């Protein structure tokens, strides 16, 4: 896909806005920290990346800053619309006329604790050094798999397999296809965990395709091939069968690493309750 002239201008306009928001937020009363997550922090930005900005406030300033979450983004550039679930939610997403968006998340300083998701961040403003300390503690955290995590992932995946069968039997095709896509995502999440990565949030496909993907070309090709081409039960069965062994393969690895007591035979039997070679 060739870039349009508008799209070629996105990085420049986004960088101009980035400078404006940093200057504005550092001057805002009650703001004591500012950092980026996402592709800014990982250094993987491309033409279509958004800005994931995290604003840290003094506890007593938190509600005041949240109440202004649709005011200060207007100071950075021309907002086309906001993607927001309500005035009390501590985040908003501003979509700008430069054809990019800024995700703004607001945190009380007392709520910000070390976590795996804070290993990769780009600190912009941290006069007290608190953010740097949290990042260092986060880097030291273990990313080893545990039984609970793998068991939850396994249970949800197998539930989607059974639900795909039920919905196809009822000819509820949108629901059935949604389940198939959820299984595809679960397998991709398993591959991420196999690499020692924290998987994306449920059904979040960000960076799982293309040049920025941590998945191998073979894995990406498998994901791309698991499509239901016809709204008939036989085609849903076909895709479920194609997914079965790749799923069991990654489940076996994760179960062994986490100490979860499951067998490939049990999983295969559960899977084939929804579809079998003979269907």
Image (cartoon, helix red, strand yellow):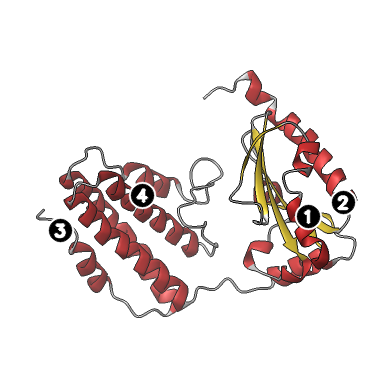
**For this rendering, which residue is in front, 56 or 237?**
56
- For disc 2, the marked residue is 28
- Give me the residue at 61% from left, 74% from top: 142
**Residue at the left extreme of this rendering:** 278
- Real-space CA distance between mark 4 and mark 3, rounded to the nearest whole angstrom: 19 Å
Residue 220, x across and y down, in percent: 42, 46
Q: Nearer the viewer, mark 1 or mark 3?
A: 1
Say if mark 4 contacts mark 3, CB within 8 Å.
Answer: no
Callout 2 secondary element: loop
- For disc 4, the marked residue is 181
Q: Residues within 10 Å of mark 2 (few under 14, many from 20)?
A: few
**Mark 3 or mark 2, earlier in chain:** 2
**Mark 1 or mark 3, earlier in chain:** 1
Say if mark 2 contacts mark 1, CB within 8 Å.
Answer: yes
Say if mark 3 contacts mark 2, CB within 8 Å.
Answer: no
**Mark 2 or mark 1, earlier in chain:** 2
**For this rendering, which residue is in front, 169 or 90?**
90
- Real-space CA distance between mark 3 and mark 2, rounded to the nearest whole angstrom: 61 Å
**For this rendering, which residue is in front, 11 or 203?**
203
- Give me the residue at 35% from left, 69% from top: 155
- For disc 1, the marked residue is 65
**Mark 4 or mark 3, earlier in chain:** 4
Q: Nearer the viewer, mark 4 or mark 3?
A: 4
Callout 3 secondary element: loop
- Real-space CA distance between mark 2 and mark 1, rounded to the nearest whole angstrom: 9 Å
**Mark 1 or mark 4, earlier in chain:** 1
- For disc 3, the marked residue is 276
């Amino acid at each position: 896909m060739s870039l349009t002239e508008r799209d070629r201008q996105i990085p420049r306009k986004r960088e101009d806005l980035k400078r404006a928001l940093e200057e504005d937020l550092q001057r805002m009363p009650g703001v004591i920290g500012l950092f980026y997550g996402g592709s800014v922090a990982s250094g993987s930005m491309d033409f279509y990346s958004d800005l994931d900005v995290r604003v840290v406030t003094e506890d007593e300033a938190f509600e005041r800053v949240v109440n202004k979450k649709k005011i200060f983004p207007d100071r950075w550039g021309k907002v086309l619309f906001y993607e927001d679930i309500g005035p009390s939610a501590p985040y908003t997403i501003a979509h700008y006329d430069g054809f990019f968006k800024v995700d703004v998340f607001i945190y009380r300083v007392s709520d910000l604790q070390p976590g795996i998701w804070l290993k990769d961040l780009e600190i912009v403003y941290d006069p007290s050094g608190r953010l740097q300390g949290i990042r260092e503690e986060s880097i030291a955290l273990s990313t080893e798999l545990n039984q609970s995590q793998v068991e939850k992932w396994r249970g949800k995946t197998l539930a989607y397999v059974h639900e795909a069968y039920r919905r196809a039997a009822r000819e509820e095709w949108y629901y059935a296809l949604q389940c198939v896509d959820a299984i595809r995502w679960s397998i991709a999440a398993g591959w991420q965990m196999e690499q020692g990565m924290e998987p994306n949030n449920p059904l979040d496909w960000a960076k799982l395709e293309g040049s920025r993907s941590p998945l191998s070309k073979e894995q990406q090709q498998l994901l791309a091939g698991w499509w239901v081409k016809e709204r008939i039960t036989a085609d849903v069965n076909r895709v479920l069968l194609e997914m079965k062994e790749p799923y069991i393969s990654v489940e076996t690895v994760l179960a062994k690493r986490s100490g979860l007591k499951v067998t490939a035979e049990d999983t295969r039997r559960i899977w084939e309750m929804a579809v079998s070679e003979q269907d």
